Image (spheres, helix red, strand yellow):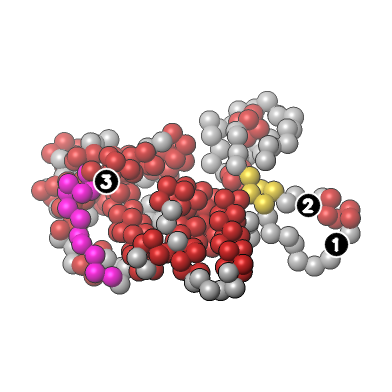
Amino acid sequence: MEKKQKKPSGKKVLDLCPNIDDCPDKNCETCNNIPLRYFVKHPPNGTFTIEELEKMSLFIGELEIKPITDNKDGIKLPVSFYIVSGEKKFKETKNPVYAIEAFINAHEAGLYPPLSILNFLADTFKKYHEMLGDVSLDKLLGFSGWKGQYPAFKQVIMNEDRDQPLMLDIYRLRRLFNISVEKSAAMVSARLNEMPDKEWNKTGLKINKPGYHHLRDRYFDKWIKIFEQDDHDEITGRGFAKWTEDDKIEYLKKYPSTSIPPKLKQKYKLR
């Protein structure tokens, strides 16, 4: 959906407004020219006059959606990030769990999911209806390709619940301290090796603890393209910019001293 053009104020407030609510101008040149992905809102409850309906907008831009996630580093991301991410992962992997997650995230935010997700679910329900229920929804949704539901969910858990937090740690170390992927992965691996399983594995499943080579290779193969792309890096960079020197020191203390590069130890006076 193309954004309706408005007359810009001519001011340039920010290089990139992370959220329209954070822009003091609301109509600055940057906000006006940023290409946005738009979502359709759920219809309002109740009855309305024609005049009232005409004043309502059914569309909302991705930057206008309130951030819903505030992780331990204070980096807030709008729900649109998770909706689009789920849609992309579903297209890449065909794992139906990602489609379900994108649908749930959108619905709980009062939005319609991407059309590709709606089409997938509608086609599945249509086939199920035409076959009078003779074929299970599990099979029609695509779980059978994963030899049952458990492997499909485990694949997501391995990618998201296990790998993603560790990949975020690698990215965080790179963004905060400007060190290489190899050094970051070595620090994360060393910290992970000292942690009991119950502290890092919150999935309830028996999954392996990844080692250094897995962390390094997974970051290079997949996650560097996600975290270090320009738009993501711009948004998260604002969160990292709020870190004080004391914040950085406290974060480094979470890692084994032997894993911290000598230059960082010297700079932050760590033993």
The quadrant in which residue 245 appears is: top left
State the CA–CA distance, disc 1 to disc 3: 52 Å
State the CA–CA distance, disc 1 to disc 2: 10 Å
Quick check: 205 left or right of 137? left
Residue found at x 73% / y 36%: 4
Name the amino acid type tagged 2.
Answer: Met
| Residue, disc 2 | 56
Residue 22 at x, y = what percent?
58, 44
Name the amino acid type tagged 3.
Answer: Arg
Identify the secondary structure beneath mark 2.
Answer: loop
| Magenta residue check for 183 | no
Residue 101 at x, y = what percent?
49, 60
Which tag, 1 or 2, sits closer to the chain's start? 1
Res 203 label: none
Which tag, 3 or 2, sits closer to the chain's start? 2
State the CA–CA distance, disc 3 to disc 2: 45 Å
| Residue, disc 3 | 218
- Looking at the image, do the residues carrying marks 1 and 2 touch, with CB atoms under 8 Å apart? yes
Quick check: 36 left or right of 244? right
Identify the secondary structure beneath mark 3.
Answer: helix
Residue found at x 42% / y 57%: 95
Residue 65 in sight here: no
Res 48 label: 1
